Amino acid sequence: MKYFATWLIVMVLLAGELYAQDHQFDPPWNTPPAAGVSFTVPGIDNAPDLYGDIIDPQLVIFFAGNQFMVIDSLIHDFKQVYPQYQRVFAETLPPGILAQQILTGSLVMGNLRIAIQPDIYTAGKSRIDQLKDSFSVVRNYADNTLAIMVQKGNPKKIGGLKDLGRKDVRVAMPNPAWEGIGKRIEEAYVKAGGPSLKEAVMKDKTAKGSTYLTKIHHRETPLRILYKQADAGPVWLTEAWYQQMIGHPISLVKIPEKENIRATYWAGILKSAPHPQAAKDFMEFLMGPRGQQIYKHFGFAPPEL
């Protein structure tokens, strides 16, 4: 009986440890805002891509999700420079989803319905062009390139994009249906290995289950790699950089320039902006030295003017 009790205690402790580790890498990866009650439950009640004050905001920004890492610093410093704006709300969902939210007027996440109009929308050039008639001002403020995110130490010895076509490599791949990066990665596959590489990763391996198409790659790809559900994932370089910056067991494989693509990030002030002066002030901050320094800190390249 004594040994059984000891065994039972050990099993309970191990089970608790395993359960605690189930969500050890889960977002939010930033510091959440202070509140009267903090109640975030990883895997159940957790909304890492909604930031700040949704009630009576003085500024609303929809950021393409792959910029999530800059939000804390960007909004904090903006409030310091413009102290008249203390209630800011931001979303960092995939740009295609944000575009649909703008066009339809609302978004539902779980049981929460968000019917809020943004002042500023940021995305890649193609998304901005799709909504070009909606903006009063549009500016290019940062650039980026692709890289491959892999498990720490790169156990599968991924050397480049061609290796993502291997049968033994599980790939986390952004879905081109609503993530702009997905289409750019497809371009890079063709540059690296021709249409056959794109076909192998996007069709053959997807059908067999060794390519997983994400809905929100800037959260899913790191998590699938960190929890060893994927071996590699093509991402923006800044996303792999950030995971290393915060100490997660991630390695980064660079893609040579001849196989890579360059993305440009654009911000547009909407003609329907509820807070037009705040939008103008934020745009000035974003394009100014302080905003640009924040993007540089997180690995983004300056815009090619």
Image (cartoon, helix red, strand yellow):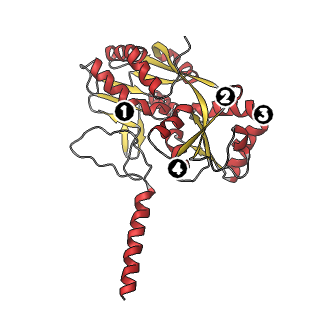
CA distance separating discs 4 and 1: 34 Å
Q: Which of marks 1 and 3 precedes in the sequence?
A: 1
Quarter of the figure that contains the C terminus: top right
Q: Is residue 143 left or right of residue 291?
A: right
> Is there CB contact under 8 Å for labels 2 and 3?
no
Residue at the spot of label 2: 260
Does residue 58 lie above or below 225 as drawn?
Answer: above
Mark identifier at residue 115: 1
CA distance separating discs 2 and 3: 13 Å
Q: Which of marks 3 and 2 precedes in the sequence?
A: 3
Residue at the spot of label 4: 226
Q: Which of marks 1 and 4 precedes in the sequence?
A: 1
CA distance separating discs 3 and 1: 43 Å
Q: Choose between 252 and 50: the one closer to the eye.
A: 252
Q: Which of marks 3 and 4 precedes in the sequence?
A: 3
CA distance separating discs 4 and 3: 30 Å
Image-quadrant location for residue 284: top left
How far across and down, in percent of the image, does residue 260 sit?
67, 28
Residue at the spot of label 3: 194
- Residue kind at label 4, given as amino acid type: Leu
How far across and down, in percent of the image, does residue 193 sit?
77, 35
Q: Residue furthest front?
A: 153
Other-residue count near label 2 (Cα within 10 Å), few / some / many at <14 / 14–19 / ≥20: many
- Residue kind at label 3, given as amino acid type: Gly
The mark tally for this picture is 4
